[in-house]
C-alpha cells in the first residue's frame, strides 16, 4: 500500500528490513535480499576499498537521510549470518558489483 509510510523504501525502513532479514535465522535457512533502485559511490571513509570508493544504495530519502554504504550492508546482512545460512542478494543498481563489500575470491579447479 503506497499510502503506508512504513512500506516506503526509506533509509530507516531499508535498515530495519535488513536487520529483520537476518534475525532468528538458522543453519539451512535461505534468505533473499533484493534492491532495485539507484546506486552510487562515495569516497571511502575507512580505507578498506582498493579503488578508494565505497558503493552505496540510494533509498527514497537519500537526499535528506543519506545513502546506505556497502560497509553497513556487509555488517548487517553478511557478518551476522550463522554458519549454514545462505544469502541470495539481487541488487539492480549502478555500482552494485561490490555492494555487499565481499572479497573477490576465485579458486582454480572448482
Image (cartoon, grey):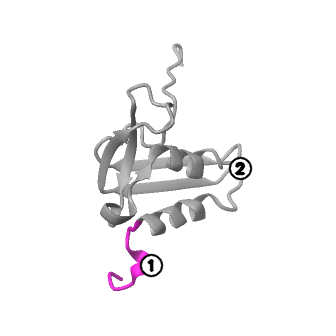
**Residue 80 position (above or below residue 4):** above
Place of residue 44 in the rendered image (x, y in percent of width and height, measured from the top left): 42, 36
Residue behind mark 2: 27
Q: Nearer the viewer, residue 99 or 22?
A: 99
25 on left or right of 42: right
Q: Nearer the viewer, residue 5 or 91?
A: 5
109 on left or right of 66: right
The stretch in magenta equals 1-10
Which residue appears at 28% of the width and 44% of the height? 94
Secondary structure under badge 2?
loop
Q: Earlier in the sequence, mark 2 or mark 1?
A: 1
- Quadrant where the N terminus sits is bottom left
**Residue 22 position (above or below residue 43):** below
Place of residue 102 in the rendered image (x, y in percent of width and height, measured from the top left): 51, 35
Alpha carbon separation for disc pair 2 and 1: 30 Å
Residue behind mark 1: 6
Contact check, label 2 and label 1, Cβ < 8 Å? no
Q: Residue furthest top?
A: 108
Q: Nearer the viewer, residue 56 or 87?
A: 56
Amino acid at each position: 500500500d503506497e499510502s503506508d509510510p512504513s512500506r516506503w523504501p526509506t533509509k530507516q525502513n531499508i535498515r530495519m528490513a535488513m536487520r529483520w532479514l537476518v534475525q532468528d535465522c538458522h543453519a539451512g535457512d535461505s534468505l533473499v535480499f533484493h534492491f532495485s533502485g539507484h546506486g552510487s559511490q562515495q569516497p571511502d571513509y575507512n580505507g578498506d576499498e582498493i579503488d578508494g570508493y565505497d558503493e552505496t544504495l540510494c533509498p527514497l530519502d537519500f537526499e535528506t537521510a543519506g545513502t546506505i554504504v556497502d560497509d553497513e550492508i556487509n555488517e548487517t546482512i553478511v557478518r551476522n549470518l550463522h554458519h549454514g545460512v545462505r544469502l541470495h542478494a539481487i541488487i539492480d543498481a549502478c555500482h552494485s558489483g561490490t555492494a555487499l563489500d565481499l572479497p573477490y575470491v576465485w579458486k582454480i579447479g572448482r
